[in-house]
Image (tube, grey):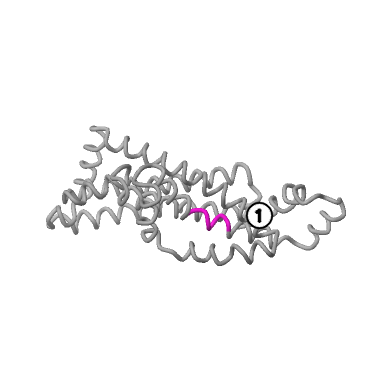
Amino acid sequence: MSFRVQFLSIFVFFALWQIGARNLNPILMPTPWLVVQAFGDLLSRGVLQEAFMTSLQDLAYGYFLAVVTGLVLGIVVGRFVTAERIFSPFITFFMATPTIALVPLIIIWFGFGLTARVFLIAIVATWPVTINSAMGIKVLSRLLREVGWAFRLSEPQFIRWVALPNAVPYILAGLRVALGRAVVAMIVAQMTMELTGLGGLVMIYGNAFKTAHLIAGVFTSAVFAVFLSSVMDIIRDRFFPWIKGISA
């Protein structure tokens, strides 16, 4: 039933779009059929595939760095009060800083290439992982803490066998938020640092007033993000099935 409702809502959206845009200048708003044709054109010339692979590379590098850094920092902040006091102002600062505001500084540091794009993605996506991981570590119940003390676990053993498993729902939530921020940072980096990938595609066709091609690039970016989010859901259900029961 829910699938049919979703399909119907999508159909109605495109139908209204087709009706509303058919009498408008295509530069202002192309019809869905023109966007489909533009999408086919991009595919036939191999432009979309190349842009997609570049974006996937940027996102993979940046997101991996964000996850590793965020998890390590989150564990430290969650376990040690002094570390929390030291890093808390910096975490708040970077969470509140708009992505676009970091671009000029990163260009000065790293130039316009892959390194700059990866750094922007990483620095934007790190903090949701850090905050959620730290929260998952901190909310550990007193009973579990006493279990660790009773078995005389060392600090690394306590983190590995008690704290981290308890924090898994928080960590996965942080990874999901970080993924969304990473995709946004990826698009911004590709639009402002070097016209490449899906972000560069959107900027190039926007400057050329090829709105149908621009919207095809935007839709591809959105579908890309939705696909990655679905992959994360599959991983969660496959390796951490009890979390779905908790959220229900």
Q: Position of residue 123 (x, y in %)?
A: 47, 53
Q: Is residue 35 left or right of residue 76?
A: left
Q: Which residue is mark 1?
A: 75
Q: Quadrant of the C terminus?
A: bottom right
Our reading of the magenta stretch's main secondary structure is: helix
Residue 149: give x, y in percent of width and height. Answer: 84, 56
Q: Position of residue 1 (x, y in %)?
A: 46, 52
Image height of 89 relative to 245, above or below:
below
Q: Residue at x 42, y 48 (%)?
A: 226
Q: Which residues are magenta?
A: 125-130
Amino acid identity at mark 1: Ile
Taking depth in this image into account, of 88 and 16 the one nearest to the observer is 88
On screen, 159 above or below 101? Answer: above
Q: Secondary structure at mark 1?
A: helix
231 or 131: nearer the viewer:
131
Residue 248 seen in the current view: no
Q: Nearer the viewer, residue 127 or 227?
A: 127
Number of dots carrying numbers: 1
Residue 79 visible in the shown view: yes
Residue 53 lies in magenta, yes or no?
no
Q: Position of residue 153 (x, y in %)?
A: 82, 50
Left or right side of 6 for 129: right
Residue at the (72%, 60%) spot, across then down = 140
Graded by Cα atoms within 10 Å as few (under 14), some (14 to 19) or many (20 or more), the crowding at tag 1 reads: many
Position of 91 relative to 226 (above/below): below
Q: Nearer the viewer, residue 164 or 154?
A: 154
